[in-house]
Image (cartoon, helix red, strand yellow):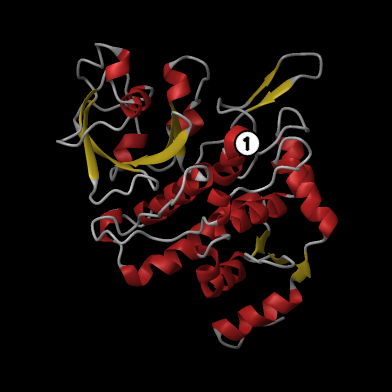
């Protein structure tokens, strides 16, 4: 209906108009999509306790916290998108105030879900111990208003699982299966880690199976699906250092200087404060900042990169995997951790 009314009353009205319960068969279909073995395994404790809480460290006001290993493939994309939202306004993320964090988180979650819904609609599932309810929105402004009023529920345990359900339903189960190289793949891998398809769904809006640019037709009905356009936030991967995958320019040079960093079965985040970092290759030294929601950091980790340095010679085992990831983009860089131990 029309305008009028305050934000809260509008959100309540929307909730009633656009809400439905998630049926048992729909939940079963989501679990079949998520988990190997037809969805019998389900969420472990690390996933069930994960919400989107901010850390207490004053130097890291933007930092989300991951209490246990496992959900990093969801937490890191949310963290990266949140950092992107701040950088898009021309601000340094270190200047985020406690008063604006909740609104920022709501906008971030809205962005992820709206993108998954092809910029036309989105569905929000809130954490629940009983029946799950799905709230669908066809206007982004209404989605943001709703999430702004409900964001504390997504900070609580179960918030991470609820976001995964929300992203799947925003995209639709059928489209997620179509996004993947093979429709019977799963969004979760072994040991309760996220598969690349789930990370891609959260960062690009589509659950593609690969990280190269575009699509590759291998013939015989075998089509490999990658990233179709330049992403807002990027990806750097240790697997590329070992030449087992190729990260395309759509992820390596995203719209904003924020990258999800995949190394040693863990996802963390690297960002810079200059848009020059996603422009043509430069010759001047610059700073990157490393943040790991699982790392219990108590200060900002600043990494100084000289793109024309001497590279990372020496024993591969003695070089931080994060350095290897950085050099997949800046190949000859010399890297200074500024007194911090290199992250291993």
Q: Position of residue 28 (x, y in %)?
A: 80, 50
The image quarter in which residue 322 lies:
top left
Residue depicted at 23% across the width and 56% down the height: 59
Q: Which residue is mark 1?
A: 197
Left or right of 200 on screen, residue 307: left
The quadrant of the image that shows the N terminus is bottom right
The total of numbered circles placed on residues is: 1
Q: Is residue 226 visible?
A: yes
Q: Position of residue 83 (x, y in %)?
A: 38, 51
* 63 versus 318 height, above or below: below
**Residue positioned most to the right:** 25
**Residue positioned most to the top:** 314
Q: Nearer the viewer, residue 14 or 67?
A: 67
The image quarter in which residue 110 lies:
bottom right
* 321 versus 73 height, above or below: above
* 147 versus 83 height, above or below: below
């Amino acid at each position: 209906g029309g305008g009028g009314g305050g934000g809260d009353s509008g959100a309540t009205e929307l909730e009633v108009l656009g809400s439905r319960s998630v049926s048992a068969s729909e939940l079963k279909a989501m679990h079949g999509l998520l988990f190997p073995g037809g969805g019998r395994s389900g969420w472990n404790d690390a996933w069930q306790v994960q919400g989107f809480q901010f850390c207490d460290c004053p130097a890291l006001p933007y930092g989300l916290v991951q209490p246990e290993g496992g959900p990093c493939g969801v937490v890191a994309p949310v963290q990266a998108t949140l950092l992107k939202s701040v950088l898009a306004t021309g601000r340094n993320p270190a200047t985020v105030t406690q008063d604006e964090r909740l609104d920022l988180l709501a906008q971030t979650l809205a962005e992820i879900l709206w993108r998954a819904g092809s910029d036309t609609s989105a569905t929000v599932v809130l954490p629940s111990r009983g029946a799950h309810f799905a709230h669908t929105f066809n206007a982004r402004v209404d989605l943001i208003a709703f999430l702004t009023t409900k964001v504390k529920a997504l900070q609580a345990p179960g918030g991470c699982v609820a976001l995964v359900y929300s992203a799947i339903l925003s995209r639709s189960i059928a489209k997620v299966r179509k996004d993947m190289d093979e429709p019977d793949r799963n969004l979760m891998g072994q040991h309760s880690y996220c598969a690349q398809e789930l990370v891609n769904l959260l960062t690009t809006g589509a659950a593609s199976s690969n990280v190269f640019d575009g699509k590759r037709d291998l013939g015989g009905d075998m089509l490999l699906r990658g990233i179709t356009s330049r992403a807002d936030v990027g990806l750097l991967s240790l697997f590329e250092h070992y030449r087992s995958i190729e990260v395309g320019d759509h992820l390596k040079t995203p719209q904003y200087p924020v990258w999800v960093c995949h190394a040693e079965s863990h996802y963390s985040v690297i960002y810079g404060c200059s848009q020059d970092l996603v422009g043509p290759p430069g010759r001047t030294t610059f700073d990157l900042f490393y943040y790991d929601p699982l790392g219990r950091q108590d200060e900002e980790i600043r990494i100084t990169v000289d793109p024309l340095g001497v590279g990372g010679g020496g024993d591969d085992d003695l070089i931080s995997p994060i350095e290897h990831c950085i050099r997949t983009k800046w190949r000859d860089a010399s890297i200074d951790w500024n007194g911090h131990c290199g992250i291993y």
